[in-house]
Image (cartoon, rainbow, N blue to C red):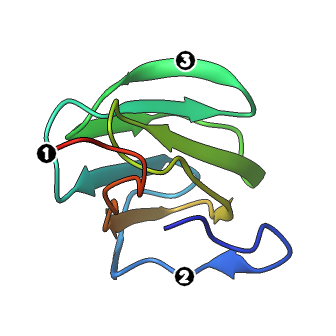
Amino acid sequence: MAKNTDEILLPEKQTDLSHGQTKIILRTNKQKARIYLNNTYQGISPLTITDLVPGIYFLMIKKEGYTPYTTTIQVLPSYTQEYYIQLVASSNTIR
């Protein structure tokens, strides 16, 4: 499901880290989805990204046969933030 990029997606779970460190964990209901932050490819799901500069990031997740998912996340210092993204099959996919 495409998400409104005007809203910041809140993490499913957030835990403390050492002062100043950052870590985000991105999981999807469909494995091996391509993950991008600020339009830069990061890897495939499930994916853990560490040492990001705290701030606002544009998140995009793509998988063939599924509607691209886009939203905004806020990476906070001193936290691990976990996100679970539900991808939805594209309506033009032949089954």
Q: Counting other residues with Cα less than 10 Å from the Cα at mark 3, is it few (<14), some (14-19), or many (20 or more)? A: few
Disc 2 to disc 3, how far (Cα)? 21 Å
Mark 3 or mark 1, earlier in chain: 3
Q: Residue 75 carries which label?
A: none
Residue 25: x and y in percent read 31, 51
Q: Is mark 2 on a helix, strand or loop?
A: loop
Q: Which residue is drawn at 73% across and 49% down?
A: 57
Q: In this view, does 63 lie to the left or right of 8?
A: left
Q: Position of residue 41 (x, y in %)?
A: 54, 17
Residue 18 sits in which quadrant?
A: bottom left
Q: What residue type is labelled 2?
A: Leu
Give the residue at mark 3.
41
Q: Nearer the viewer, residue 94 or 90?
A: 94
The residue at the point 54 percent across, 82 percent down is 10
Mark-to-mark CA distance, 3 and 1:
28 Å
- Please name whichever residue, 40 or 69, is drawn nearer the observer in this view of the structure: 69
